[in-house]
Image (spheres, helix red, strand yellow):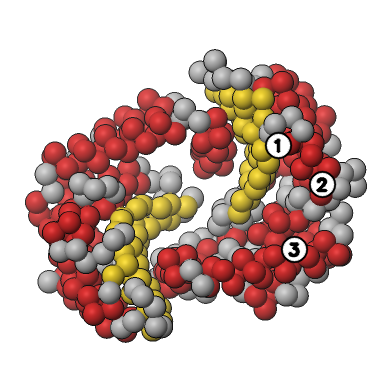
């Protein structure tokens, strides 16, 4: 498999990887315009804009957009994250040109019809309401806000309802003008694709765009804090977050291995101790997430309200223990899970296209897979235990709890238990 990267004169980048034997392809445009790129008064507009992408262009109605892709058996979708908004299709190799034409149309020629804006506003308000009614959804927004207070990266991607209710056509068009420049876009494709043809099509469709000056991105600064909300729910939801490394820091691999050993699978410490031995929860996991300039290690579980304090105590104890007696066997298992997950993901053209776009956005290139595997293999037991020690001895943490007895644990309680 060969990865190729081309940059047009205006900064627009095309990255692709042909996957021999596949008859399908995933192709999309990843725009470096996510939640963290919004000003306070814009919070939620990147997500609103994603919704409007499929509501009509100067050449296609919303139905015609869907029919163009589904008539050839394809699939079209989009998503918004804190650092990117993606618009992508999955089609047969012979229809890659069509897929790119549709995506370029929705990005370059949106009509932002006022009636459609009102319809989609209602859809998004329902989505916000649904998220607020889903405890294991909203708790992560609260955790993010507690970790990065008063910062763009700490705000919810959906935005608050009161802002969504007031966005106008001019607001949407203004965000596109500010953030959808050619240097902020990456065309990424994987599967049955031809790089030269993609470059030719991209030059025709996007080569005329001119760069625009965007506001400087506000750096992420982990502050820490807590949000606790008591409510009469069946379960108390518990989410604990530690400051961690970003994508550009090789310590991210240590963070990912530690998270996997703590709560990445059925053999992990937290799963075994909290669920298998004590039966305190049904779901518990740990994961390492990262941004371009920072990251977090997050532990989540749901339990009965009267067991929340016990859950917090066991979690702190297991993190302390990880600094003392994490074994080579556990680290090797976590390392194997990480590498297997990476390699299995590469078997999907959609996952591969997303990975290519993310790597280009971070590094300006696509590091060889062997380079990434070597960095995973280079993580030592000392690296892992040292990171666990920092988490327990110098804890920079955030906490979110939601449900019965949510106030029974606090950041100070957990910090005291971590330090011992």
Q: To which residue does mark 2 refer?
A: 63
Single out the mark in the foreground, 2 or 1.
2
Of badges 1 and 3, the one in the foreground is 3
Identify the mark at residue 120; answer none if there is no mark: 3
Look at 68% across and 41% down and name the residue there: 76
**Disc assigned to residue 12:** 1
Q: Is residue 264 above or below residue 375?
A: below
Mark 2 secondary-structure assignment: helix
Is residue 98 shown left or right of residue 124? Answer: right
**Residue 79, position as x, y percentages in the image:** 61, 51
Location of residue 257 with respect to 351 vertically, above or below: below
Eye-nearest disc, 2 or 3: 2
Check if mark 2's residue and mark 1's residue have beta carbons within 8 Å: no
Q: Secondary structure at mark 1?
A: loop
Residue at the image position 34 percent from the left and 60 percent from the top? 298
Q: Secondary structure at mark 3?
A: helix
Q: Do residues under tags 1 and 3 come within 8 Å of each other at their CB atoms?
A: no
- Residue 319 is situated, as x and y percent measured from the top left of the image, at 19, 60
Q: Residue at x 13, y 49 (%)?
A: 326
Specify the farthest residue to the left: 325
């Amino acid at each position: 498999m060969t990865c190729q990267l081309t940059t047009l004169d205006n900064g627009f980048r095309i990255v692709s990887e042909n996957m021999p034997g596949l008859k399908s392809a995933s192709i999309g445009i990843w725009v470096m315009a996510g939640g963290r790129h919004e000003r306070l008064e814009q919070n939620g507009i990147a997500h609103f804009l994603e919704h409007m992408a499929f509501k009509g262009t100067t050449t296609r109605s919303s139905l015609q957009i869907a029919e163009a892709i589904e008539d050839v058996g394809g699939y079209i979708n989009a998503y918004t994250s804190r650092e990117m908004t993606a618009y992508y299709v999955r089609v047969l190799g012979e229809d890659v040109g069509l897929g790119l034409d549709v995506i370029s149309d929705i990005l370059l020629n949106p009509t932002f019809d006022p009636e459609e804006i009102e319809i989609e506003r209602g859809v998004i308000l329902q989505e916000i309401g649904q998220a607020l009614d889903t405890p294991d959804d909203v708790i992560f927004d609260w955790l993010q806000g507690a970790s990065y207070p008063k910062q763009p990266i700490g705000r919810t991607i959906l935005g608050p309802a009161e802002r969504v209710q007031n966005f106008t056509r001019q607001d949407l068009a203004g965000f596109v003008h500010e953030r959808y420049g050619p240097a902020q876009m990456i065309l990424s494709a994987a599967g049955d694709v031809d790089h030269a043809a993609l470059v030719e099509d991209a030059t025709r469709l996007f080569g005329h765009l001119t760069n625009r000056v965007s506001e400087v991105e506000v750096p992420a600064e982990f502050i820490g804090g807590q949000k606790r909300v008591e409510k009469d729910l069946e379960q108390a939801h518990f989410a604990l977050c530690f400051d961690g490394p970003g994508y550009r820091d090789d310590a991210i691999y240590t963070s990912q291995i530690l998270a996997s050993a703590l709560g990445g699978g059925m053999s992990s410490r937290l799963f075994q101790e909290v669920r298998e031995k004590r039966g305190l929860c049904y779901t518990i996991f740990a994961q390492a997430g990262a941004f371009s300039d920072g990251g977090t290690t997050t532990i989540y579980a749901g339990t009965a309200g009267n067991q929340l304090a016990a859950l917090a105590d066991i979690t702190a104890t297991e993190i302390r223990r990880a600094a003392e007696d994490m074994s080579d066997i556990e680290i090797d298992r976590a390392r194997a899970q990480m590498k297997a997950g990476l390699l299995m993901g590469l078997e999907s053209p959609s996952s591969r296209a997303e990975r290519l776009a993310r790597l280009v956005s971070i590094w300006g290139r696509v590091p060889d897979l062997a380079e990434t595997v070597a960095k995973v293999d280079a993580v030592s037991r000392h690296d892992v235990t040292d990171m666990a020690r920092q988490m327990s001895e110098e804890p920079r943490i955030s906490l979110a709890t939601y449900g019965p007895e949510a106030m029974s644990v606090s950041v100070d309680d957990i910090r005291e238990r971590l330090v011992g």
